[in-house]
């Protein structure tokens, strides 16, 4: 959370807010219930679920902050990298019902629930069911460097 707090943001607005749900609390249950069924299946094992929300208007002039999601995402990225540094693993999710989460957690007008992050400790692969093992143990993939880094003309 401290790493997220220090993230840069447009106009230093710091539009991010984090609703922290610890397992066994009402907040945790509300966040869990807002997840799509598939995510609930595994996220229920996480000791902490965080609802990532952000303020949509700039505070200084009440105009739309076009980068509120960008700023929130950057703060979350800082958070998960520092978590990793401290031995805590994370899994982000956009598969959730934001309206439901906003209602059940009384999120004020003008704030939008963008994503959820599950935090926990790395388990052992033997704990996975067959279905999850297939997904979790397959090689991780990314686009080639040359696809994402453009040195000449953009030509997609
Ligand atoms: C914004 C965002 C939303 C995501 N939503 C989900 C989700 O709802 N459910 C899920 O299982 N994974 C979700 N993921 C995880 C991605 O599917 C995952 O990062 C991607 O497939 C690459 O896998 P890897 O990071 O293990 O290599 C999300 C990741 C991000 C950054």
Image (cartoon, rainbow, N blue to C red):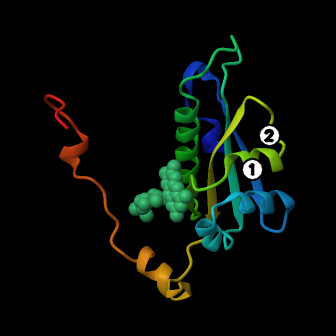
Could you say which is closer to the camera, residue 89 or residue 46? 46
Q: Position of residue 67 (x, y in %)?
A: 53, 27
Q: Residue at x 55, y 53 (%)?
A: 80
SS of the residue under disc 1: helix
Question: In the shown orientation, is residue 29 left or right of residue 113?
Answer: right
Quarter holding residue 42? bottom right
Name the residue furthest top. 61
Give the crowd class for mark 1: few <14, some 14-19, many >=20 residues within 10 Å. Answer: many
Q: Position of residue 3 (x, y in %)?
A: 60, 43
Q: Residue furthest left?
A: 152
* Residue drawn 42% across the image and 80% down it: 134
- Residue 25, percent across and down? 85, 63
Would residue 60 appear left or right of 108 to someone viewing this image?
A: left
* Relative to 16, residue 127 above or below: below
| Residues at marks 2 and 1 touching, judged by CB atoms closer than 8 Å | yes
Whichever of callouts 2 and 1 sits on the residue coming sooner in the sequence is 1
Res. 107 mark:
2
Quadrant for residue 141, please give it.
Answer: bottom left
The image shows residue 135, relative to residue 50, as above or below, that is below
Residue 133 circle label: none
Q: Please indicate whether residue 102 sits to the left or right of residue 10 in the image.
A: right
Q: Could you say which is closer to the camera, residue 16 or residue 29?
A: 29
Residue 131 percent location from the top left of the image: 48, 82
Please state, as top left, top right, bottom left or bottom right, where the C terminus lies in the image: top left
Distance CA(mark 2)–CA(mark 1): 8 Å
Circle 2 residues within 10 Å: few <14, some 14–19, many ≥20 = some
Rendered image quadrant of residue 151: top left
Q: Is residue 136 visible?
A: yes
Q: Can residue 84 be seen at all in this image of the molecule?
A: no
Q: Report whether the residue tagged 2 is closer than 8 Å to ligand 1.
A: no
| Tag of residue 101 | 1
């Amino acid at each position: 959370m401290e790493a997220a707090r220090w993230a840069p943001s447009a106009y230093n607005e710091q539009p991010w807010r984090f609703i922290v749900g610890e397992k066994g609390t009402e907040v945790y249950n509300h966040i869990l219930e807002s997840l799509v069924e598939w995510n609930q299946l595994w996220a229920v094992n996480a000791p902490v679920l965080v609802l990532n929300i952000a303020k949509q208007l700039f505070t200084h002039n009440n105009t739309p902050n076009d980068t509120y999601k960008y700023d929130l995402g950057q703060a979350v990225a800082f958070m998960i990298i520092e978590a990793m540094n401290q031995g805590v693993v994370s899994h982000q999710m956009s598969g959730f019902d934001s309206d439901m989460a906003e209602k059940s957690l009384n999120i004020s007008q003008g704030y939008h629930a963008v994503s959820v992050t599950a935090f926990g400790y790395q388990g052992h692969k033997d704990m996975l069911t067959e279905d999850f093992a297939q997904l979790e143990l397959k090689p991780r993939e990314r686009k080639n460097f040359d696809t994402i880094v453009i040195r000449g003309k953009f030509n997609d």
